[in-house]
Image: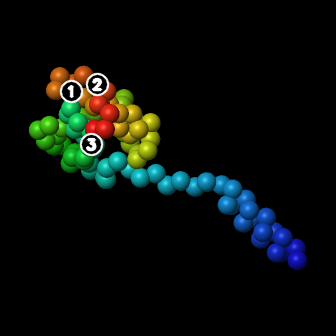
Amino acid sequence: MGLALVATAAAGLLSACSFRIQDAQCGDGEYPVLAVNSSGGQCVQDGQEPPKGWARYPEGKVPEYVGDRWDEYWTTHTLDENGKIVTLPEGQ
């Protein structure tokens, strides 16, 4: 009986804890880039420049994990062709 009670208590404590594994934006050896004047992102190999129509995120505003602060921010913002942060039109 005592062992069953301990096991039940341990299971309750474990289920109360939320373990969240965060998905990285890019794999090792890659960095994230942002679509210019549009929504979306992709990963580029370290040492390579972003393809035409893509840009590096501004310093200090780079998303590291799916769903983090900057990942959420860039769902409603982008960079224009001059590198200025602009709000995306709704539905884009």
Q: Amino acid at mark 1?
A: Asp
Task: Find disc 3 in the rendering and name its residue.
Answer: 40
Q: Quadrant of the N terminus?
A: bottom right
Residue at 77 percent of width and 71 percent of height: 7
Measure the alpha-carbon separation of dots 3 and 1: 13 Å
Task: Assess whether mark 3 and mark 2 are in contact (beta carbons under 8 angstroms).
Answer: no
Q: Which residue is mark 1?
A: 80
Residue 41: x, y in percent? Answer: 26, 43
Residue lying farthest left?
52
Estimate the x, y position of residue 12 in percent, counting from the top left.
74, 62
Kindly check if marks 1 and 2 are in contact, taking CB atoms under 8 A apart as contact: yes
Q: Position of residue 39 (x, y in %)?
A: 27, 39
Q: Which residue is at a point 43% across and 44% down the rendered structure image?
A: 67
Q: Are marks 3 and 1 in contact (CB under 8 Å)?
A: no
Q: Which residue is pictured at 25% across the width and 46% down the height?
A: 42
- In the rendered image, is residue 23 in sight? yes
Q: Is residue 92 left or right of residue 54?
A: right
Tell me the quadrant of the picture where the C terminus can be found: top left
Identify whether 85 is placed above or below 33.
above
Q: Earlier in the sequence, mark 2 or mark 3?
A: 3
Determine crowd level at label 2: few under 14, some 14-19, many 20+ residues with C-alpha closer than 10 A: some
Q: CA distance from mark 1 to mark 2?
A: 7 Å
Q: Position of residue 43 (x, y in %)?
A: 25, 47
> Helix or strand or loop: what does disc 1 sit on?
loop
For badge 3, the amino acid type reads: Gly
Q: Which residue is mark 2?
A: 86
